[in-house]
Image (cartoon, rainbow, N blue to C red):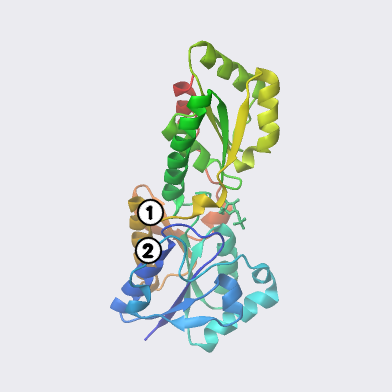
Amino acid sequence: DSKVAVLTSGGDAPGMNTAIRAIVRKGIYHDLRVYGVFHGYDGLLRGEIKEMELGSVADIVHRGGTILKTARCEEMFTAEGQRLAADQLKAKGIEALVVIGGDGSYRGAKKLAELGIKVIGVPGTIDNDIAGTDSTIGFDTAVNTVVEAVSKLRDTASSHERTFLVEVMGRNCGDIALHSGLAIGAESILTPEIPFDLQEISEKLLRGYRRGKNHSIIICAEGAGDIREIASGLKNYSGLENRVTILGHIQRGGAPSAADSLLGAMMGGKAIEALMEGKSEVMISHFQNEIVDRPLELAFKEKKMFNRKLYELANELAI
Ligand code: F6P
């Protein structure tokens, strides 16, 4: 029987467990032996590899986080670390590794491929910042978490007639900000991809207040700049009081949304399909409304596109 392993790497994301479950169950269904690597590449280097059974993934489909645990591993960036990782897999007769994580994790996978391990990448990150796929596992849940949190902030913003700046995650990608901002009808959405002008935003806020608006919500991607500086800039230009809320790691937790659960199941299943077809160095991708496999290197070579149309729509709706 062929042996395959799965690990999660980088920041955890809701829906990773659903993907792990799909990989383990579909793999076993097709007579593969499936191994779980614990603690990401860190654990791989230490040989933390355990065979998974059908029951190993029972009762996890609805749980956030990752049962395999995860880590960010510096050593995987060194040639020595990469060799050790490949050797740990080979010592157990494991031919293939499915890596659920972001593009940083794919770089390690690419190195393992050069050392004779078949690798499949599955996009798992709340940031939605991976080129080559339209969506990543965890993004939808994170957006929903932001929407829910902002609806609570709106109550107090409205009672006190205040402006709130809400910082959301996403690293260098503004997708969480854009999607949640449009969903909640934010007055402004600040992202790293599009330059913004605090004076203009202040004027818009003041126009809104003159029209009778009693509170405003501004969604700020963490990559757009220092939120405290942005807040004090806005205060200076507009004279309006504001408050800053940093949502932080709450965005990485919680049960996966139905959309992320489905995506995890479909992408996990597709990873096993790709392996059974003998493929390697591919990423599982949500592309043109289908779950397909595409070359792993797209994640490094292509630039993740920012949806300017959506951004423009958000602006048009928040005049
Ligand atoms: O990549 C997911 C993410 O949550 C980013 O949005 C954020 O910038 C980063 O991870 C935070 O990393 P850490 O959990 O290591 O502080």
Q: Nearer the viewer, residue 168 or 190?
A: 168
**x 68%, y 36%: residue:** 228
Looking at the image, the residue that sits furthest to the front is 159
Q: Position of residue 250 (x, y in %)?
A: 51, 51
Secondary structure beneath disc 2?
helix
Q: Which residue is mark 2?
A: 18
Q: Which residue is mark 1?
A: 260
**x 50%, y 54%: residue:** 252
Badge 2 density bin: few <14, some 14–19, many ≥20, Cα 10 Å: many
Q: Is residue 136 above or below residue 155?
A: below
Ligand 1 shows up in the quarter that is: bottom right
Q: Are marks 2 and 1 in contact (CB under 8 Å)?
A: yes
Q: Is residue 198 above or below residue 147?
A: above
**x 53%, y 22%: residue:** 161
- Lateral position of residue 151 relative to residue 195, left or right: left
Q: Nearer the viewer, residue 76 or 73?
A: 73
